Image (tube, rainbow, N blue to C red):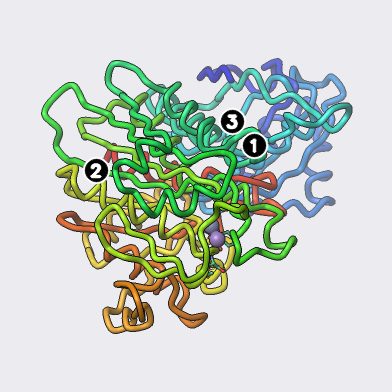
């Protein structure tokens, strides 16, 4: 998408769609500024349609050739905070995709750098639709030219575009079927992002086995698509001010293994690599934004399948850290894959580790589809991530990590069980992970709810959302 900033007059600008963002205060003036072309009929039409400028609400009219644009849209700006700007721009992007608009002029009033950034992110996210495998009338092209009217910031534009394109990459990876994205191809996508500051190392199943990553191997060995371990590293030009590792769950399909999922629960389990997609997306954004931070992207990629070679209930896996894990449910596979990645990340000398995973259905039960569950004992880290999420218009919520709940993971034969019980399922999963982190501040983000939306939400089309890419990009470049 080509995005430009101009001060063209909304009355004469040529575009398939002209969208004017309005708040309760600016609505009347916005209508007045363009209503001469419509002989004053817009004001009465909007009033009759009882348009209220709440964030993301839209009213669209054909222009009948009275202005330069073919269609005229008013979009509500709510109280014009970060999430309202995101939603408003997102609604315009979404509508433009539905109309098949090629060119859009968007007037959101004067936008500063951070407002421009989030407007661009919202527009691109709203305009996104995964229709690669559709044919015929269902398929509409994305917008190719966006013209920001009314004042916007060029730096904010460039940052927003980098973040949004990284988020779209994450969404593509999640939306692609398991037949297209499996451990080997996921690793190839990571590899394709390499440049002089971003290096990517890939371990195949032989190397994973030889290194003793029994968690990744145990989960992945039952599939014809063998596992991969991926280490991406961004090295800044100067001395880094911080060192961070992002760790992603990359289960490219989760059938549950011998603790087989029912069909309905398995239908969308290609989304189980959304944590790794967020890491790949964030690494791409970091590469493009070039902050003075050392950033590692660590991914355990595996397919959790049933076969004569799959891991079994009662098996005891020797993990990369040396811990012996007793398997009570092969569907609690994400934590096994992550455990090896977290132990690896703990050896890198980083200050902070953040992992992202579609880890538990229990996190969705607790917080619903639209909150990321955040587990950390580090209050500063919790605050920083929350601040970045708020600025990005994403929602995260703190969860507890009580040490005494670890008793639920007590094993009979090995060192630790891979499941607790039904109660507090997202918490015992996080406590399991905590056993594999040493020497760094750590935060676990369970993105099982927001990473994939069956029906879509607000400006997000159904499917992958690229959850946490905008938050991570802000947190790392802050
Ligand atoms: N990938 C699932 C979690 C999940 C569920 C993600 C729904 C997205 C939407 C994970 O591997 C899993 O199966 N977790 C089990 C854990 C249980 C066996 C302890 C779960 O949540 O039921
Ligand atoms: Mn599972
Ligand atoms: Zn899973």
Q: Quadrant of residue 261?
A: bottom right
**To which residue does mark 1 refer?**
176
Q: Residue at x 69, y 35 (%)?
A: 130
Q: Residue at x 70, y 39 (%)?
A: 74
Q: Residue at x 74, y 62 (%)?
A: 264
**Does label 2 point to a residue whose CB lies under 8 Å from ligand 3?**
no
| Dot placed on the residue nearer the N-terminal end, 2 or 3 | 3
Q: Position of residue 374 (x, y in %)?
A: 38, 63
Q: Is residue 95 above or below residue 69?
A: below
**To which residue does mark 3 refer?**
107
Ligand 1 visible in quadrant: bottom right
Out of 314 and 266, give the one closest to the viewer: 314
Helix, strand, or loop for circle 2? strand
Front: mark 2 or 3: 2
Q: Is residue 329 above or below residue 242?
A: below
- Tell me the tag on residue 317: none
The answer to whether residue 405 is seen in the rendering is yes
Q: Position of residue 75 (x, y in %)?
A: 66, 42
Helix, strand, or loop for circle 1? loop
Q: Residues within 10 Å of mark 2 (few under 14, many from 20)?
A: many
- Tell me the tag on residue 244: 2
**Does label 1 point to a residue whose CB lies under 8 Å from ligand 1?**
no
| Dot placed on the residue nearer the N-terminal end, 2 or 1 | 1
Q: Are marks 2 and 3 in contact (CB under 8 Å)?
A: no
Q: Give the alpha-carbon distance from disc 2 to disc 1, as whole Å.
A: 28 Å
Out of 137 and 29, give the one closest to the viewer: 137
Q: Position of residue 296 (x, y in %)?
A: 28, 37
Front: mark 3 or 1: 1
Q: Position of residue 230 (x, y in %)?
A: 38, 36
Q: Are marks 2 and 1 in contact (CB under 8 Å)?
A: no
Q: Is residue 298 left or right of residue 322?
A: right
Q: Give the alpha-carbon distance from disc 2 to disc 3, as whole Å.
A: 38 Å
């Amino acid at each position: 998408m080509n995005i430009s900033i101009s001060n063209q007059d909304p009355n004469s600008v040529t575009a398939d769609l002209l969208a004017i963002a309005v708040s309760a205060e600016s609505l009347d003036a916005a209508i007045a500024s363009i209503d001469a072309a419509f002989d004053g009929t817009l004001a009465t039409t909007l009033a009759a349609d009882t348009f209220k400028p709440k964030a993301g609400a839209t009213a669209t009219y054909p222009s009948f050739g009275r202005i330069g644009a073919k269609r005229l849209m008013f979009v509500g700006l709510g109280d014009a905070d970060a999430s309202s700007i995101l939603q408003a721009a997102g609604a315009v992007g979404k509508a433009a995709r539905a109309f098949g608009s090629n060119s859009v002029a968007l007037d959101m009033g004067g936008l500063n750098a951070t407002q421009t950034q989030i407007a661009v992110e919202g527009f691109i996210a709203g305009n996104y639709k995964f229709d690669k495998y559709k044919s015929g009338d269902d398929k509409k092209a994305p917008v190719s030219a966006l013209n920001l009217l009314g004042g916007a910031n060029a730096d904010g534009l460039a940052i927003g575009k980098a973040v949004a394109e990284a988020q779209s990459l994450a969404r593509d990876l999640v939306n692609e079927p398991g037949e297209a994205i499996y451990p080997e191809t996921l690793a190839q996508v990571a590899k394709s992002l390499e440049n002089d500051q971003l290096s990517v190392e890939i371990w195949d199943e032989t190397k994973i086995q030889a290194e003793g990553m029994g968690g990744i191997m145990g989960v992945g060995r039952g599939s014809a698509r063998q596992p991969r371990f991926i280490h991406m590293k961004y090295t800044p030009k100067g001395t880094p001010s911080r060192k961070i590792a992002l760790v992603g769950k990359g289960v490219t399909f989760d059938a549950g293994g011998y603790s087989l999922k029912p069909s309905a629960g398995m239908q969308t389990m290609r989304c189980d690599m959304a944590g790794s997609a967020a890491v790949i997306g964030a690494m791409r954004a970091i590469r493009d934004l070039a902050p003075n931070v050392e950033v590692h992207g660590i991914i355990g990629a595996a397919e959790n399948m049933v076969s004569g070679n799959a891991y079994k209930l009662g098996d005891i896996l020797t993990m990369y850290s040396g811990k012996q894990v007793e398997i009570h449910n092969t569907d609690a596979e994400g934590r096994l894959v992550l455990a090896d990645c977290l132990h690896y990340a703990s050896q890198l000398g980083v200050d902070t580790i953040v992992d992202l995973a579609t880890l538990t259905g229990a996190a969705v039960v607790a917080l619903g589809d639209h909150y990321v569950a955040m587990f950390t004992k580090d209050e500063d880290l919790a605050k920083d991530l929350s601040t970045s999420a708020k600025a990005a218009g994403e929602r995260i919520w703190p969860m507890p990590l009580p040490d005494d709940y670890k008793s639920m993971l007590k094993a009979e034969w090995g060192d630790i069980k891979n499941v607790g019980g039904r109660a507090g399922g997202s918490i015992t999963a996080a406590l399991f992970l905590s056993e594999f982190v040493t020497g760094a501040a750590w935060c676990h983000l369970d993105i099982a709810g927001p990473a994939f939306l069956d029906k879509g939400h607000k400006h997000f089309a159904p499917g992958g959302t690229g959850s946490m890419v905008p938050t991570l990009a802000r947190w790392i470049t802050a």
